[in-house]
């Protein structure tokens, strides 16, 4: 039995709950060019467009529900407790709604907004984004890590990967850095590395590949772990 487990999840685990992948082959996210709605430059040039985009994504999230893969990872956390860490590239709240508590949302959270003031106040937000920070009056922005920005809690992530015995990446190609380097760091630190995905990932540093939909293969894999 592994002592320390780190899980990385990507768009594939949420796709079965009706949430489209972040970016398709055409560079679009929900029919919007990512450079216009998912970059600091896009927000600076047209903040109203960006805010409206995330308001719509927030509203759409209300219709999504955690699937069997999300619930299985809750069981894994309940079994391993503080020796379990879930890192997600997704900005939805499906892991948290399913019951996971030890979660790092490295790309931010759709249901949070933050101000651009010196204190960077962060607020829970389920409806439209407020125009100004209720604490200091500064301008608000989505609490999302856009392209060109550094993901959250990278130090904590790297430390966990360096100490884990088992690393699994689920529903993600692992092709975009820094997440692309997670399996290498875990493998070089002595962990057993597992990929659960619709397509096998190239690039090495993976000991085991389990092909299939997350909602089908993750519960079975969790039972084995």
Image: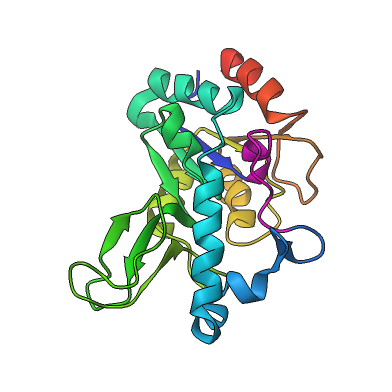
- At x 77%, y 28%, the residue is 212
Is 85 situated left or right of 37 in this image?
A: left
Give the vertical position of 43 relative to 155 (above or below).
Answer: below
Q: Is residue 148 covered in magenta?
A: no
Give the vertical position of 164 relative to 129 (above or below).
Answer: above
Give the vertical position of 185 relative to 53 (above or below).
Answer: above
Is 175 situated left or right of 188 in this image?
A: right
x then y, percent, for residue 25: 81, 60
**Colour mode?**
rainbow
Residue reaching furthest to the bottom: 45
Residue 218 seen by the camera:
yes
Q: Is the magenta region chiefly helix, strand or loop?
A: loop
Q: How many labels does the image show?
A: 0
Q: Is residue 22 covered in magenta?
A: yes
Q: Which of 39 and 5 is in front in this view?
A: 39
Q: Nearer the viewer, residue 156 or 25?
A: 25
Residue 170 seen by the camera:
no
- Quarter of the picture holding the C terminus: top right
x then y, percent, for residue 222: 57, 19
Q: In which quarter of the image is residue 170?
A: top right
- At x 60%, y 43%, the residue is 187
Q: Quadrant of residue 77?
A: top left
x then y, percent, for residue 202: 80, 48
Is 144 situated left or right of 112 in this image?
A: right
Numbered range of the magenta stretch: 11-23
Is 34 situated left or right of 128 in this image?
A: right
x then y, percent, for residue 198: 79, 36
């Amino acid at each position: 039995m592994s002592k320390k487990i780190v899980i990385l999840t990507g768009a594939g685990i949420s796709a079965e709950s009706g949430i489209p992948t972040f970016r398709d082959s055409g560079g679009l996210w929900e029919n919007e060019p990512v450079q216009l709605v998912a970059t600091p430059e896009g927000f600076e040039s047209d903040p109203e467009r960006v805010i409206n985009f995330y308001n719509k994504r927030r509203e759409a999230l209300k219709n999504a529900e955690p699937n069997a893969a999300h619930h299985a990872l809750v069981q894994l956390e309940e079994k391993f407790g503080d020796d379990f860490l879930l890192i997600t590239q997704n900005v939805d709240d499906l892991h948290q709604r399913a019951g996971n508590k030890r979660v790092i949302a490295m790309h931010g959270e759709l249901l949070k907004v933050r101000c651009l003031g010196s204190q960077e106040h962060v607020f829970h937000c389920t409806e439209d984004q407020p125009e100004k920070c209720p604490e200091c009056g500064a301008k608000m922005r989505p609490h999302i890590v856009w392209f060109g920005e550094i993901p959250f809690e990278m130090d904590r992530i790297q430390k966990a990967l360096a100490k884990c015995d088992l690393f699994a990446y689920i529903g993600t190609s692992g092709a975009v850095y820094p997440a692309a380097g997670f399996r290498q760091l875990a493998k070089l630190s002595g962990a057993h590395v597992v990929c659960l995905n619709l397509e096998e990932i190239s690039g090495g540093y993976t000991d085991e590949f389990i092909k299939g939909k997350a909602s089908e293969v993750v519960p079975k894999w969790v039972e084995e772990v």
